[in-house]
Amino acid sequence: MNAVNSIEVEDLRRVFTRRAPRKPPWRRRRESGGNGTMPASNCNLLNDQPNATVAVDGISFAIRSGEIFGLLGPNGAGKTTTIKMLCTLLEPTSGTARVAGYDILREPARVRGSMGTVFSSERSLYWKLTGRENLEYFAALYHVEPSSTASRIDYLLGKMDLQAKSNELVERYSTGMRQRLAIARALLADPRVVLLDEPTAGLDPQSARNLRDTVRSLSDEGHTILLTTHYMAEADELCDRIAIIDHGRIIALDSPASLKASLEEIHSLEVEVDKAPDGVLDELRSLPLVRGVESHTSDNGLDTWIIRVLTEDTRQTLDTLLDLVRASGDRVLNMRVNEPTLEDVFIALTGKSLRD
Ligand SMILES: Nc1ncnc2c1ncn2[C@@H]1O[C@H](COP(=O)(O)OP(=O)(O)O)[C@@H](O)[C@H]1O
Ligand SMILES: [Mg+2]
């Protein structure tokens, strides 16, 4: 592990499988003629490939100590799954990661000891306890030194602007206050790394702004921060570097400034073809001016495919693109050249809008 990195992620992958629901026993019995043996058709059902969702599809990145690093992507991109693997709530299907130098597979307890995690729908607070009581409970759970617990809690309540409401029940807190209390809870053991999953989701604009200030102050105090968001502006404003994630893959990773600078030069070429273009995609990706290649079935119901190529030079790439597609035996049905804005390019990169 590189000493300047607080998080290192190597080819992390997570696949969820959903098996066909088991039929209730009376139906199984009835369908098998009542003798309890399973008919051949049911055996086949059990042998069928379960539905698989590739939530995180081989991502790698490193977060430097003290950095605010953002995972930016639309709903379903794999952000929460990534956070859950890093905080050892979920085992990766393959790949690994290190947090503060500890391997998430081999040293999960040490990983948990060096990080604090806050999930967006914060259900880990006790609503029938006061804010202070919540922190006292979790301080004991996290083995915070008893002699320093009271002063640590006072410090965090002050820092999170909850001092005045510290003796009120959490059920009377606003969403913003609960989110701040959840962050205070995550900071109890003074972790080196803080993971925040969609920290401003569901907050009003003013509370969201305050929360971003809080995140910045955590960074100023030396915490390394990994946050997820589907708000472009938030990632832009807050993060030192951003990884744009979609369909479980990182499709861009850089500082907001470099990301914007590079995106501004990119144009998007769309070609509609009559067959799945798998054969040409890798060749397209290896072209010098091509910055991204993506393909999907078209949504016109005609069973055609769209190849989308992000390129720095439309003219040069278009020629090669058409040659490659024709050489692979696909027919070009339609073509479009887009000159996108930053937001458009973002949508082109992720394949969908980030807005709610
Ligand atoms: N426990 C689960 N079982 C099956 N599929 C899941 C599970 N958790 C997440 N997924 C799927 O994995 C993908 C990524 O989900 P998630 O990591 O929650 O995305 P994000 O946080 O970026 O919105 C989605 O397609 C989601 O439906
Ligand atoms: Mg999520």
Image (spheres, rainbow, N blue to C red):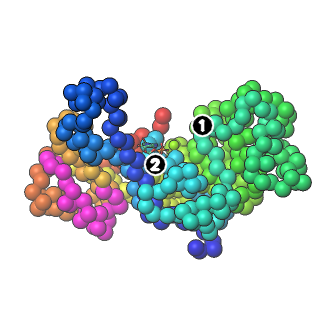
Q: Which residue is mark 2?
A: 78
Q: Determine if residue 90 is in view.
A: yes
- Tell me the crowding category of disc 1: few under 14, some 14 to 19, or many 20 or more residues within 10 angstroms, Cα based: some
Q: Which residue is mark 1?
A: 121
The percent position of residue 165, horizontal first and vertical second, equals 82, 32
Inspect the image, locate mark 2, and give the three-letter code of the amino acid beneath it: Gly
Of labels 2 and 1, earlier in sequence is 2
The quarter in which the N terminus is drawn is: bottom right
The percent position of residue 139, horizontal first and vertical second, equals 78, 48
Taking the magenta stretch, the answer to whether it contains residue 291 is yes
Q: Is mark 1 within 8 Å of ligand 2?
A: no
Q: Is mark 2 within 8 Å of ligand 1?
A: yes
Q: Residue at x 60, y 37 (%)?
A: 121
Element type at marker 2? loop
Seen from the viewer's position, the closer of residues 335 and 20 is: 20
Alpha carbon separation for disc pair 2 and 1: 16 Å
Q: Find the residue positioned furthest to the bottom.
A: 2
Seen from the viewer's position, the closer of residues 239 and 104 is: 104
The answer to whether residue 286 is left or right of residue 128 is left
Element type at marker 1? loop
Q: Residue at x 67, y 45 (%)?
A: 212
Q: Which mark is residue 322?
A: none
The residue range painted magenta reads 273-293
